[in-house]
């Protein structure tokens, strides 16, 4: 799994998500995508309380 730089593709065999530099909940299209990003991509800003649950206050998910 390659984590550098932000644009480096990181693929999961079960998803089609890849690290592309997005960092914020407003840039995500689903909770699954946000979870992929916080687990696999550097410099995300979606888990302020660091409990492993991204975008907790985002009412879209």
Image (cartoon, grey):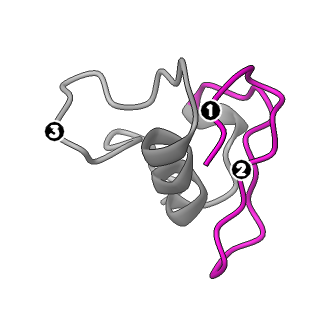
Q: Please identify the quarter of the rendering in which residue 4 is found.
A: top right
Badge 3 marks a residue whose secondary structure is loop
User: Circle 1: is it few (<14), some (14-19), or many (20+) Cα within 10 Å?
Assistant: few
Say left or right for 9 vs 1.
right
Q: Which mark is residue 55?
A: none
Q: Residue at x 33, y 31 (%)?
A: 47
Label 2 sits on residue = 10
Which of label 1 and label 3 is nearer to you?
Answer: 1
Q: Residue at x 53, y 65 (%)?
A: 32
Badge 2 marks a residue whose secondary structure is loop
Give how far apart the Cα atoms at labels 2 and 3 are. Answer: 22 Å
Give how far apart the Cα atoms at labels 2 and 1 are. Answer: 7 Å
On whether residue 6 falls in the magenta region, the answer is yes
Badge 1 marks a residue whose secondary structure is loop
User: Percent from the top left, x then y, of residue 19?
Assistant: 73, 40
Among the two numbered marks 2 and 3 on one chain, the one whose residue lies closer to the N terminus: 2
Label 3 sits on residue = 51
Label 1 sits on residue = 3
User: Circle 2: is it few (<14), some (14-19), or many (20+) Cα within 10 Å?
Assistant: many
Q: Nearer the viewer, residue 8 or 33?
A: 8
> Magenta region: which residues?
1-24
Among the two numbered marks 1 and 3 on one chain, the one whose residue lies closer to the N terminus: 1
**Residue sitting farthest toward the front:** 1
Mark 1 and mark 3 residues within 8 Å of each other at the beta carbon:
no
């Amino acid at each position: 799994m390659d984590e550098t730089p932000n644009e480096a593709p990181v693929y999961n065999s079960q998803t089609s998500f890849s690290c592309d530099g997005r960092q914020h909940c407003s840039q995500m299209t689903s909770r699954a995508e946000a979870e992929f990003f916080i687990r696999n991509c550097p410099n995300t800003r979606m888990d302020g309380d660091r409990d492993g649950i991204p975008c907790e206050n985002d009412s879209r998910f």
